[in-house]
């Protein structure tokens, strides 16, 4: 794939799965209508704790050759960043342990990630003052969006390892973003591009009935 091309949505996505999730949004499935305080409770409203780690994607798990992998940070930045996997791994390494919450109801505690903190990458790229949103693009064509203050949180990282092992392809390896304070659809697997924007640009699920922000404590499932 020429690295400067837009990443197209791969043809073989699971149309039925996508249609079913759009139906969930129309029906407001799983909504309990309650809020919770993350300082008082560990499980957000309407969630169910799992011990395994479900795999969710659009039906395509891109086989990214580590030699060709790139991470680009561009748009409203003073210094556009373009990293190979070796360059990415040579940056200061961060470790985070956090809980993840998928909008399809499962939550999983104590996930140990290794990678590069978002703040480390933002220090390299130097966002311009007018940058208020980010749009993230992955090798399967998936996109999602975040406000700068949600993207720049100190617990967020671009992870290349989980529990001390390289992140498996099915969970987004070589590298995925992890944004634990929002529903897990805001944590793109196989991520390749971060674009800093003045205006918000809703992503794949955000234009299909899912909430623009996705705070599990406020039960922002649909919007
Ligand atoms: N590139 C990409 N990232 C993605 C998705 C996807 O389809 N493509 N699905 C999202 C959703 S809905 C969830 S719940 C999590 C699932 O991550 P997991 O398969 O590692 O559990 O990835 C998110 N990131
Ligand atoms: Mo999800």
Image (cartoon, grey):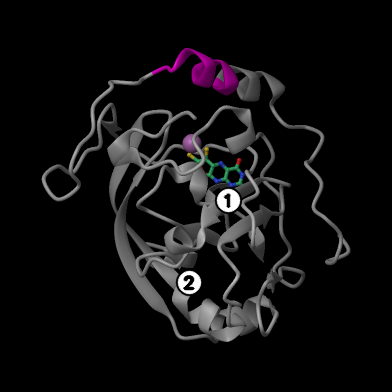
Find residue 88 and report its horizontal and vertical position in percent: 59, 79
- Residue highlighted by disc 2: 118
- Residue highlighted by disc 1: 145
Report if residue 15 lies within the magenta region.
no
> How many numbered discs sit on the rendered protein?
2
Q: Which residue is at a point 48% across and 71% down the rendered structure image?
A: 118
Whether tag 1 and tag 2 are in contact, CB under 8 A, the answer is no
Q: Which residue is at a point 28% across and 26% down the rendered structure image?
A: 46
Specify whether 202 is left or right of 156.
Answer: right
Which residues, given as a range, are shown in magenta? Answer: 21-29
- Main SS of the magenta segment? helix
User: In the rendered image of this protein, does residue 151 appear above or below residue 108?
Assistant: below
Q: Could you classify mark 1 by the number of other residues whose Cα lies within 10 Å: few (under 14), some (14-19), or many (20 or more)?
A: many
Specify whether 157 is left or right of 154.
Answer: right
Quadrant containing ligand 1:
top right
Q: Nearer the viewer, residue 165 or 117?
A: 117
Q: Which of 218 and 172 is in front in this view?
A: 218
For residue 86, which quarter of the picture?
A: bottom right
Q: Which residue is at a point 35% across and 66% down the rendered structure image?
A: 155
Q: Is residue 107 visible?
A: yes
> Of all residues shown, which one is farthest toward the front?
130
Find residue 169 and report its horizontal and vertical position in percent: 59, 53
Find residue 108 and report its horizontal and vertical position in percent: 31, 43
Specify whether 141 is left or right of 126.
Answer: right
């Amino acid at each position: 794939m020429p690295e400067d091309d837009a990443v197209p949505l791969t043809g073989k996505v699971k149309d039925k799965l996508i249609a079913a999730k759009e139906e969930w949004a129309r029906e407001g499935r799983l909504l309990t209508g309650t809020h919770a305080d993350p300082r008082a409770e560990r499980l957000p409203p309407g969630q169910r704790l799992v011990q395994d780690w479900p795999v969710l994607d659009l039906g395509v798990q891109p086989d990214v050759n580590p030699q060709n992998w790139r991470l680009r940070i561009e748009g409203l930045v003073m210094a556009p960043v373009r990293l190979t996997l070796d360059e990415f791994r040579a940056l200061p390494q961060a470790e985070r342990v956090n809980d993840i919450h998928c909008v399809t109801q499962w939550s999983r505690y104590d996930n140990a990630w290794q990678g590069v903190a978002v703040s480390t990458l933002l220090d390299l790229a130097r966002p311009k003052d007018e940058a208020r949103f980010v749009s993230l693009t992955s090798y399967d064509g998936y996109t999602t969006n975040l406000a700068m203050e949600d993207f720049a949180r100190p617990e967020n990282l671009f992870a290349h390892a989980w529990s001390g092992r390289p992140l498996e392809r099915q969970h987004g390896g070589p590298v995925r973003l992890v944004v634990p304070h929002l529903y897990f659809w805001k944590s793109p697997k196989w991520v390749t591009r971060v674009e800093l924007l003045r205006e918000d640009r809703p992503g794949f699920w955000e234009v299909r009935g899912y909430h623009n922000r996705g705070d599990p404590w406020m039960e922002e499932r649909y919007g």
